[in-house]
Image (cartoon, helix red, strand yellow):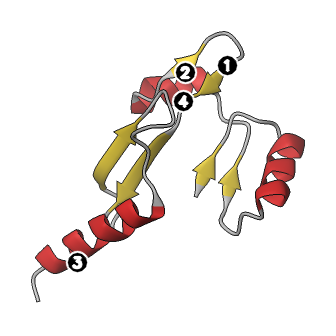
Amino acid sequence: MALSVDPLEKAEETVKGLKLTFPVGYGIDAKTFSARTGVFYEAKGLYLHAAGFLLKPGGTVFNSVYSSLALGRFGPDDVASLVEIVRSREPK
């Protein structure tokens, strides 16, 4: 899932342009989201910096990454590895 401060029309353009197949929320209030999650935002232009949250079943946060540049963001391989770690530690 992804969230964006963009209005519906711009979010739809992004989904189409990137051929996304997962849900994308739109119209997120940057200041409120930042206050609740700690995600950085830019007051000029009111946009959110990238952040990623991995949730365990039940919705608790297992891991999070905050990034104001392209480095340090979750990639697909990172997510897959972390999911495997969580699964391997679950009681059988």
User: Alpha-carbon distance for marks 3 and 1?
Assistant: 37 Å
Q: Residues within 10 Å of mark 1 (few under 14, many from 20)?
A: few
Q: Which residue is mark 3?
A: 87
Q: Residues within 10 Å of mark 4 (few under 14, many from 20)?
A: some
For this rendering, which residue is in front, 92 or 78? 78
Q: Which residue is mark 1?
A: 46
Q: Which mark is residue 49?
A: 4
For the residues labelled 2 and 4, say whether their Cβ atoms are less than 8 Å apart.
Answer: yes
Q: Quadrant of residue 79?
A: bottom left
What amino acid type should be assigned to the residue bearing mark 3? Arg
Mark 3 secondary-structure assignment: helix
Work out whether mark 3 precedes mark 2 in sequence or the reverse, and give the earlier one: 2
Q: Is residue 48 visible?
A: yes
For this rendering, which residue is in front, 92 or 76? 76
Name the quarter where the N terminus is drawn.
Answer: bottom right
Q: Residues within 10 Å of mark 2 (few under 14, many from 20)?
A: some
Mark 1 secondary-structure assignment: loop
The residue sitting at 52% across, 37% down in the picture is 50
